[in-house]
Amino acid sequence: MFTNIKDTILVECSVSDIRFPFPALGPGSDANNAHTTYSNPYVVITDSDGHKGVGIGFTLGLGNDHVCRAIQELFPLIEGCRLADVVSDFRVFWRRLANPPQRRWLGPYSGSCYMAAGALANAIFDLAAKREGLPLWKLLVSLTPEETVRLIDFRYVEHLLTPHEAEAILADSFDSRHERMLAVEAACLPCYFTTWIGTDPASLTRQIGETLSATGIRHYKIKVGVDQAADRAKLAAIRAEFGNSVTLYVDANQVWSPPQAVEWMRGLADYGVTWIEEPTAPDSVDGHRYIRERLRPLGIDVVTGENCPNSHLAAHFIASGAVDRFQIDACRVLGPAENMLIMLIAKKYGIPICPHAGGSGLDELVPHLSAWNAIALAAGSDSAITEHVALCSSHFASPSRVIAGRLQLPVEPGYIVGMTDEAAARFCYPDGSAWASERSP
Amino acid sequence: MFTNIKDTILVECSVSDIRFPFPALGPGSDANNAHTTYSNPYVVITDSDGHKGVGIGFTLGLGNDHVCRAIQELFPLIEGCRLADVVSDFRVFWRRLANPPQRRWLGPYSGSCYMAAGALANAIFDLAAKREGLPLWKLLVSLTPEETVRLIDFRYVEHLLTPHEAEAILADSFDSRHERMLAVEAACLPCYFTTWIGTDPASLTRQIGETLSATGIRHYKIKVGVDQAADRAKLAAIRAEFGNSVTLYVDANQVWSPPQAVEWMRGLADYGVTWIEEPTAPDSVDGHRYIRERLRPLGIDVVTGENCPNSHLAAHFIASGAVDRFQIDACRVLGPAENMLIMLIAKKYGIPICPHAGGSGLDELVPHLSAWNAIALAAGSDSAITEHVALCSSHFASPSRVIAGRLQLPVEPGYIVGMTDEAAARFCYPDGSAWASERSP
C-alpha cells in the first residue's frame, strides 16, 4: 500500500498561528460574523527521515491559538508511531485522536480539541502523500476497497452503514475507477463562488461580472439573513443583470429559528434560489428537516455541514432526510478519512456532497476530497459542486485553480502541501509583518 | 424582580484552575475514562459593590486550562454591564455569550469555549442569588412565568416550544407553586449513587452496603462496557446481596456502536436494570432511538445528556422519542437558564429529568435545578431522580447533603456558593499542596 514509508517514524511537531487580517464587513463576512480573520492552526510533522507533512485547521481568527495549543498537546498520542501504521490502519489512530484521555470531555467529537485532531490527521495524510509522490486524491484513489475501509472507524454510524456495506459500495465501481479517473482529470470539477454580506447590490453585480469573466464560474452564493429587503435587492440586481445565466445559492450562517427560516425564504423564492445554506443551528437535524419539508414546494434545497462537528451527526443529517446536499469541511472533522466516511454515507443515501471552502487553505484541500468522491464513489453529477473563492490561495504553495469554470485537480504531491515561505512568515500571528502593519496607526 | 442589585456593575473576573488528584481506575473511572482528575474552571466575578459571585465549569482534568483561558477571554462580553440587566434579560446575554465574535466557530454551541460561557453564566446567577439572599432555586422559583421566559433564548427550539407555550406551561402550575414548594422542602428530592469501573464485585457490594447504611440511598448506578462477563458478575453479586431492594442503573459512557449496545444490554437484562446510560455517541439522536426501540421489549430505559452540548440538541433527543429520561448537566450548557429551557421542553414532552452529578461541584449545583423542576414545573415524580456521589462535596462551602435517602434542598444564598478557602488553595493546579504531594516520589 505505502512503499516509501515502511520504517518511517513520526518524530516532531511544530505549530504556527497563521492569521489573515481582513477589514470588518470584508471578506468572510456573513449574517453571523461581521468581521472574520481567516486563520489556520498550521502544523508541521517531521518524520525520522527528515521529511515534513503539513496540516492545517481553520478558524475565523480569535481562538485560533486554542487549536494550536491542543495540537501540541495531542501530538504525543502519535509521536514515535510508524507513519505506515498510522496511515494504513488509520481507524485505530482515529479512535485514539478522537478520544484523548481526559480531554475528550471538552467535546466529545466537537470543539477546538477535535479540530486539533483533524489538523494532525491532515498533516499525516499530507506527509504520506508527499512520500508516495502523489497528490492526496490520487493516493486515496489508488487504495483498494479493503484498504479504504481500514482508514475508517464505523463505531457510531454502524446502524446506518457497516464496513461491509462500505466495501461493497467501493467495490461496485472499482473496476471502472481508472477510466473514471481519466475522465474526471479531463473534465475537472464543478465549482461555485461566494460573495460576502458587506457588499451592496451594485458592487455585488460588478464582482460577479468580473469573476464570471475571469474564471467562467456561473454559480454564485450570496450571504443573506440580516435584512430581508437588502437580500431581495441584491438578488433582484443580479437577476436583472445576468438573467437566468447564473445559478444562485443563499447562505444565512445559522441566524434564523426554523420557522423564521421558512418565512424569510418564502420572501426570496421569486429570485430562483437553488439552495439555502445553514438556515439554523448547524447541529439541529430536526430544525433542518422542519425547514426542508416546508421549502420543498418552493423548489429550494436545504444544505448544511461546514459546522457539523462529526461524521455521526453528518450521517444523521444525510440518512434522515434533513438536507438535500451535505457540505463537508476539510478541517472540522478528523481529516480525509472522516470525510470519506461522510461521502460513503452520502453515496448510500443518494445525497450530493458540496464541500465547504472559501476560508484560507480550505480551497486547496477540498479538491482532493471532491476528486475522490467523483472517482472512487462515481459521484460525478454536477450537483456535487465544490466551493471555490481563492481569497488566500496565492499564499499557498499549490494554489487552487479554476479554468473555464472548472476546478482543476491538484497535481503537486501532498494534501495542503504548505504555505509559501514568504506567506508563512508574513501572516504568523502576532509577529508577522502583516500584523505589524495592522498595529501601526 | 431583583431588589438589591439595581445599579450594580460587573467589574472584574478572576479564574483558578482547580483539579482533584485521583488514582487511575479510582473515582470517576468508567469504560471510556480509565483515569479521571475531576476539575473545575473556577471563576469569581466581582461587582461594583465588592460582592463576589462564583461559577464553575467541570472537566475530567487535562484541558481544564483551556476552559479557564476561554472564561477570561469571554468576560469582556459582559464586563461593565449592569448585573440586573444581565440576569433579568438573560436571553440577550445568552445569545451574546453563546456567539462570541470569531470564537463561535470553535463550537458553535459546544466545546471548551461554550463551557466557558456556561461557567460565566453560573457565576452571574450565583452572584444574583447571593445579593438577593436566596439559594438560587428559591430565587428562580420566585420568578413569574413572564420573568422566567425572559431568561431564555428560544431561537433554535422554536419549532418545538415557543415562548408563549413555555409561559403557558409555567402559568399552569403557578397558583399552586407555593404549596408545592413547602411540600418539596419537606419531602426533599429522590437521588441515586454511582460506583466506578475499577471496582471488583466484592468491593462493589461492600461499597453499596456501606452507602445504603450511611445515607439510606436505594438507587445505584454501575459502570459497564469494558468486559461483559465482569459486568454480569458485578450485577449478579449485587442482586445476590440485596435482592430487589435496590434499583440498578448501568452506564457505558459511550463505548458502543448502536448495534453493539443492543447486544450487550440483552446480556445484562436478567439483572433487572432500570436504565442504560450513554450507550453510544452523546450527540447521536438516531443512535439512541435505534437502541431505545430495541430495548423497549426488555423494559430497559435509554438515557443520556451529560455530554449533550446544548439545548437544541437536547430538545431533539427529548421530542423525537430517542430517550426515556434526559440527564441535564449544570456545567455543559449556558447556566441555569439553558437548563430551564431543557426542563421546559422535557415537561412538554413528558420526559423525566435526571440530572448528572458526581463530578466535583456538580453535586452542589444540581439540587437547585431539580428543585426548580419539582416546584416550578411540578415534575414531582420519583422518575426525576438526581445523581449524588459527594466525592468532593466536603471541599465546597455549601455541600450537597442526603438524609434518609433524600437529597436536601440547599439553604445557603447563591448557586455553587464557593469552595472552602482551604480547598481552593490546596487543589489549585499546579501549585496547590494537593499537587505538590502528587509530584513528590
Image (cartoon, coloured by chain):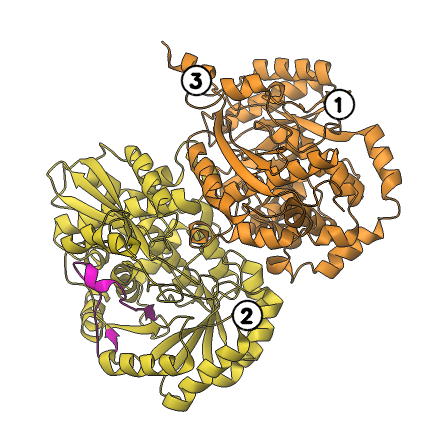
Chain colours: A yellow, B orange
Q: From the top left corner, tell me how far across and down residue A211 is, in percent.
A: 28, 79
Q: Is residue A429 left or right of residue B344?
A: left
Q: Nearer the viewer, residue A352 or A281?
A: A281
What chain letter is assigned to the residue under label 2? A
The magenta-colored residue range is: A385-406
Q: Which residue in the rendered view is the most extreme toward the front?
A: A441
Mark earlier in primary sequence (1, 3) = 1
Residue bearing the label numbered 1: B405
Residue B435 - label: 3
Mark 1 lies on a secondary structure that is loop
Q: Is residue B386 left or right of residue A42?
A: right
Which of the image's four quarters has the C terminus of chain B?
top left
Mark 3 lies on a secondary structure that is helix
Q: Please state which amino acid type lies under the numbered disc 2.
A: Arg
Q: From the top left corner, tell me how far across and down residue A20 is, in percent.
A: 29, 57
Q: What's the distance in space between the residues labelled 1 and 3, CA to CA? A: 34 Å
The answer as to whether the residues below labels 1 and 3 share one chain is yes
Residue A292 - label: 2
Mark 2 lies on a secondary structure that is helix
